[in-house]
Amino acid sequence: MKDKLEFYTVKIFIYFLGLLPKSYIYKALKIIAKLFFKFEKRRSKLTVINLKTAYPNKSEEEIRQLALSSYESVAITLAEIILMLHDRINLNDMVEDSQEFLRKMELYTKDAKNGVIIITAHFSNWGLAAEFLPFHGYPMLAIGREGNNKLIEKNITTPFREKYGNKNIYKKNALFGIIKTLKRGKLVGLLYDQKAGGENSIKVNFFGLPADTTKSLAELKLKFNPKILPVFFAREKNGKYTPIIYEPVEYTADEEVNLEEKTKKITQKYNDILEEVIRTYPEQWFWMHNRWRLV
């Protein structure tokens, strides 16, 4: 009963919000984001704590403004996802310099006999990458966390992720699918910025503090040697997006003999890339996540 109530609430919310003029959708969600920041104290306090941890030299007011900006960034992302769900937004119009980005995508993914793992993060509009890449002929096996509400997953989240040819698969059942996809020389899409736990994690530095990070990516690199391709879409002041694409990360820590040290150094390399992007656009990362397990 609870799942049905949540599902229909979300469905009605998306439907009616999607009928509004575009500017109203953005305004409405920004207002909701500010209310959440003010009244949902657990998450807003965590956001502030995370930002203070990452930027110890910033003042209280700078931290507060950055926290508010990160909430606004999420609001913009949600507004754009609603517009995507209603087919009211043109993907090509959202992205600047897309031809150069697509040229590099072709260059970096062709002849990838061991497959490609595209790594990204809960950064800016991460849903845009999941739409833009398959829309232009780069469908992926998209690895995601299964939501708590099965009806929302089945009827909203999965159709959105698979709209242009991606295949959605959940983390807990992902390994076999990833290996199969890589052996076929195809693409896997992975968000790698959240905390991990248990045997699947390893502590590496992130903004100067140890953070439990998934080591699966490094292990896949060492065992199957896929191309590791970092891709991010950064939101600019004009509301459009600049695609950021790194050259494939070929580092395999050959200077180390011990497998655990190899894994740690490779994982650190991926974390360093993520940190570099976040430091350039700090307000666009999902600071609400308990990345360092500080609370």
Image (cartoon, rainbow, N blue to C red):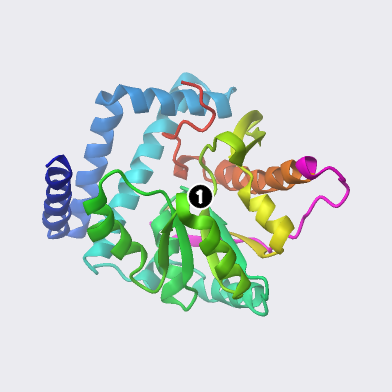
Residue 248 drawn at (x, y percent): 68, 63
Name the residue type under label 1.
Ala
Q: Nearer the viewer, residue 117 or 92?
A: 117
287 up-or-down from 24: above or below: above
Q: Nearer the viewer, residue 77 or 295?
A: 295
Specify start and end residues of the magenta stretch as a single range.
238-261
The reply to whether residue 290 is in sight is yes
Which type of secondary structure does the marked residue at label 1 adopt? loop
Q: Say which quarter of the image contains residue 154.
A: bottom left
**Helix, strand or loop: magenta stretch:** loop
264 sits to left or right of 43: right
12 sits to left or right of 110: left
Residue 108 drawn at (x, y percent): 65, 72
Residue 241 drawn at (x, y percent): 45, 60
- The residue labelled by disc 1 is 121
Image point (46%, 30%), residue name: 290
Q: Residue 67 magenta-drawn?
A: no
116 up-or-down from 80: above or below: below
Q: Nearer the viewer, residue 21 or 79?
A: 79
5 sits to left or right of 101: left
Image point (60%, 46%), residue name: 274
The reply to whether residue 235 is in sight is no
